[in-house]
Amino acid sequence: MDFSNFYNLIETNSNFIVTSHISPDGDSVGSVLAMTLALLKFQKRVVPVINDDIPKKYKFLPGSNLISKETPGIIYDVLIALDCGDRERLGFEKKLCEYARVIVNIDHHKSNTYFGDLNIVDSNASSVGEILYRLLEGKVEVDYDIALSLFTSIITDTGSIRYSNTTPLSLKILAHLMDKGVRPDYISRQVFEKRSFKSISLLKLVLDTLEISVDGKLASIYITKDMMEVTGAKDEDTDGIINHVREIEGVEVAVMFKENAESLIKVGFRSNEWFNVRQIAEQFNGGGHLRAAGCNVKLPLAKTRDVVLDTVKRHMEESGEGHN
């Protein structure tokens, strides 16, 4: 992949906004921080912005306190959007051209809409963290702080190197980052092994909604606003719940519905071995990856569940086991 146009933008511009999608995860937060710290090494003026709350578990990353929810009031030279398939998911109120003269889109989602003036999109990459390592290595010192953020990006999007998007290159990059002093056990403890009591209380309620298809290949759960209120859970407390369903023996597709408003349901999809969940998400104007995708549906919860699950069942029957 040719990064020369990106390097030219770095050399010829001074002011940068670095951003990522709402409902931030490890890849989005990690890549925003890695890019921010790298640009600071280039002596650039950088404002990292994510238009949503940063989950508590990522606050251990160096520079996380720099990320703002306040949109700059002036037009910057360059806006760098990371880990985001389309401009709407960035959560900005105005058009991106009203924030910066040049828009750079760096992503690894196959469903990316190529919304940037410069698009660096590699759907074969495990994560944006992986792309940034290739982009930064040799151009700037990848010190411990940057390495920690990149490692977090890669390790979260590969599910601790358990997912099918883990490649030999992913492992080589992780090894190089360990050479910078990064400890996988430390990051795993921060990201995967800490849960609030409220999140466990929510998990208990959510698992009571579990439904499994007759053939055992499709499983679903849902989260209501009432569940969130009664447990006092936050959005970040829902992270990872869908994996409890995906891990049930015999299940190929797991679906989680989360009630965000009376008629706005966030839907998450996961699959294990052969089913392409991205095709389902795209039918509902969403996107994502082969084994992990999502969308938002503007219908009541019960109707959303009926429509989405019927669509998944139909596609599973048409696809047949062992086909993508």
Image (tube, rainbow, N blue to C red):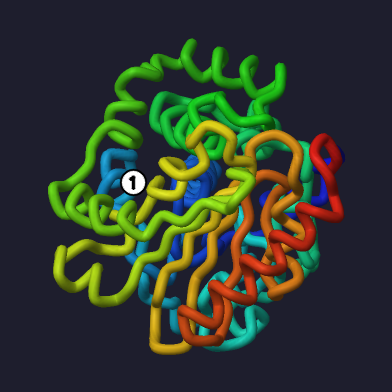
- Kind of residue at badge 1: Gly
How many marks overall?
A: 1
- In the foreground, 205 or 57: 205
Q: Quadrant of the C terminus?
A: top right
Picture layout, residue 203 above or below residue 303: above
Q: Residue at x 53, y 66 (%)?
A: 267
Query: How far across and down, in percent of the image, does residue 231 sit?
Result: 15, 63
Query: How far across and down, in percent of the image, does residue 180 sit?
Result: 45, 16
Query: How far across and down, in percent of the image, does residue 166 sit?
Result: 65, 26
- In the foreground, 262 or 80: 262
Disc 1 designates what residue?
63
Picture layout, residue 51 above or below residue 207: below
- In the foreground, 21 or 231: 231
Q: Is residue 119 visible?
A: yes
Location of residue 80 by image quarter: bottom right
Q: Quadrant of the N terminus?
A: top right
Q: Residue at x 46, y 44 (%)?
A: 245
Horizontal side of residue 147 vs 199, given as left or right: right
Picture layout, residue 163 above or below residue 9: above
Horizontal side of residue 156 vs 140, given as left or right: left
Q: Residue at x 52, y 41 (%)?
A: 246
Horizontal side of residue 127 vs 32, given as left or right: right
Location of residue 148 by image quarter: top left
Disc 1 element? loop
Crowding at mark 1 (Cα within 10 Å: few <14, some 14-19, many 20+): some
- In the foreground, 166 or 212: 212
Q: Is residue 8 visible?
A: no
Picture layout, residue 200 above or below residue 273: below
Query: How far across and down, in percent of the image, does residue 257 sit?
Result: 47, 66
Location of residue 162 by image quarter: top right
Q: Residue at x 68, y 32 (%)?
A: 165
